[in-house]
């Protein structure tokens, strides 16, 4: 068993500190959910290093305003916004069809959390699973050729310590039979994002495409709009700049070149939890890194996406 990967960065590190000295000139990046929160900060950091960055957002008017602010802040004219609704597989397909050329960095960042009532997409999929995982799976697989063309692409899957709340229930992913619980549904969707990173690396690693998942930490953003705000103790909270640091590390740092199929928190690979699973304690659940579960989910998602 190898030791978890460590870096000089940690809990308090910011995206700017992680990206310092990295040159992304000539590279193209796509960040979902980049209209606010750590998505915007991740996009800003990548743009500051010279990358061409596309903000994939549900509301293109608001996204373009954010893109304009990032162009001004970073001095990088190659920041733009494009419409993407991850709950709508037609929107995902249209977005992927419009993408031309290589894609070096894909940050699957967008998400919804703890919807109080069960909601489903037109295809009948539970909304948190649909947005947090299925839409990202559809997007990533549709952009496979562009990732391959990059000659060494990275995919970043934003998960959460909440993945410790629930594995993927393959018998009832969409809560059609079991009682709906907001946090179980959220936890399942975030476990799915870790399994996506495992699956991408297993399927495409030989093509130079590597994916990792991460827990950004507790950051007060719009994500908590259904939960009454952030309830994490103040000493364990992060700023948006700190919350984006691990995403930026996995997207751009040479320290993780060629690394894939792993789960990070606080800018380091997390330890696998061998005892009681506790989101407050951190770590990664064994079921989230399970290769057989990753393959089963990949096949199930393919059947859902069609």
Image (cartoon, grey):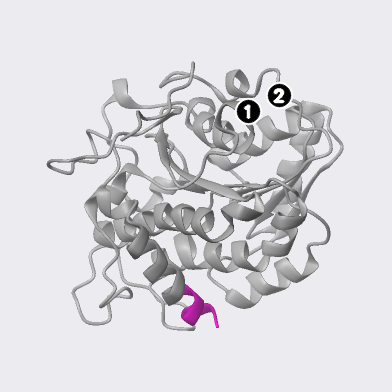
Quarter holding the N terminus is top left
Q: Is residue 41 above or below residue 202?
A: above
Residue 231 in view here:
yes
In the picture, measured across the screen, residue 305 lies left or right of residue 231, that is right
In the picture, measured across the screen, residue 204 lies left or right of residue 98, that is left
- Where is residue 77, by image quadrant? top right
The magenta span reads 301-306
Foreground: 217 or 10? 10
Give the structural element (helix, strand or loop) at label 1: helix
Q: Is residue 29 above or below residue 245?
A: below
> Mark 2 and 1 residues: CB-CB less than 8 Å, in contact?
yes
Image point (79%, 31%), residue name? 50
Foreground: 34 or 170? 170
In the picture, measured across the screen, residue 84 lies left or right of residue 296, that is right
- Where is residue 270, by image quadrant? top left
User: Which of the numbered marks, if any, corresponds to residue 254?
Assistant: 1
Image point (69%, 34%), residue name? 46
Pointer 2 residue: 22
* Nearest to N terminus: mark 2 or mark 1: 2
């Amino acid at each position: 068993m190898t030791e978890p990967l460590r870096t000089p960065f940690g809990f308090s590190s910011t995206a700017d500190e992680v990206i310092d000295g990295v040159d992304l000139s000539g590279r193209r990046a796509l960040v979902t959910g980049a209209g606010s929160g750590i998505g915007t900060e991740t996009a800003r950091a990548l743009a500051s290093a010279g990358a061409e960055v596309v903000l994939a957002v549900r509301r293109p008017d608001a996204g373009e305003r954010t893109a304009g602010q990032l162009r001004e802040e970073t001095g990088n004219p190659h920041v733009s916004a494009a419409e993407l609704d991850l709950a709508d597989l037609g929107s995902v397909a249209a977005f992927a069809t419009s993408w031309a050329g290589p894609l070096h960095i894909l940050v699957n960042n967008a998400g919804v959390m703890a919807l109080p009532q069960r909601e489903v997409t037109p295809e009948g999929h539970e909304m948190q699973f649909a947005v947090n995982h299925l839409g990202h799976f559809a997007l990533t697989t549709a952009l496979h050729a562009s990732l391959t063309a990059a000659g060494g692409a990275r995919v970043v899957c934003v998960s959460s310590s909440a993945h410790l709340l629930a594995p993927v229930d393959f018998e009832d992913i969409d809560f059609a039979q079991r009682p709906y619980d907001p946090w179980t549904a959220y936890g399942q969707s975030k476990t799915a994002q870790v399994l996506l990173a495992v699956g991408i690396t297993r399927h495409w690693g030989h093509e130079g495409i590597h994916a990792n998942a991460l827990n950004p930490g507790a950051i007060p953003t719009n994500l908590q709009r259904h939960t009454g705000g952030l309830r994490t103790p103040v000493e364990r909270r992060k700023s948006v700049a700190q919350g984006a640091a691990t995403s930026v590390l996995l997207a751009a740092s040479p320290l993780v070149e060629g690394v894939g199929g792993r789960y990070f928190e606080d800018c380091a690979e997390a330890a696998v939890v061998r005892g009681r699973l506790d989101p407050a304690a951190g770590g990664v659940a064994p079921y989230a890194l399970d290769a057989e579960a990753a393959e089963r989910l990949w096949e199930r998602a393919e059947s859902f996406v069609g």
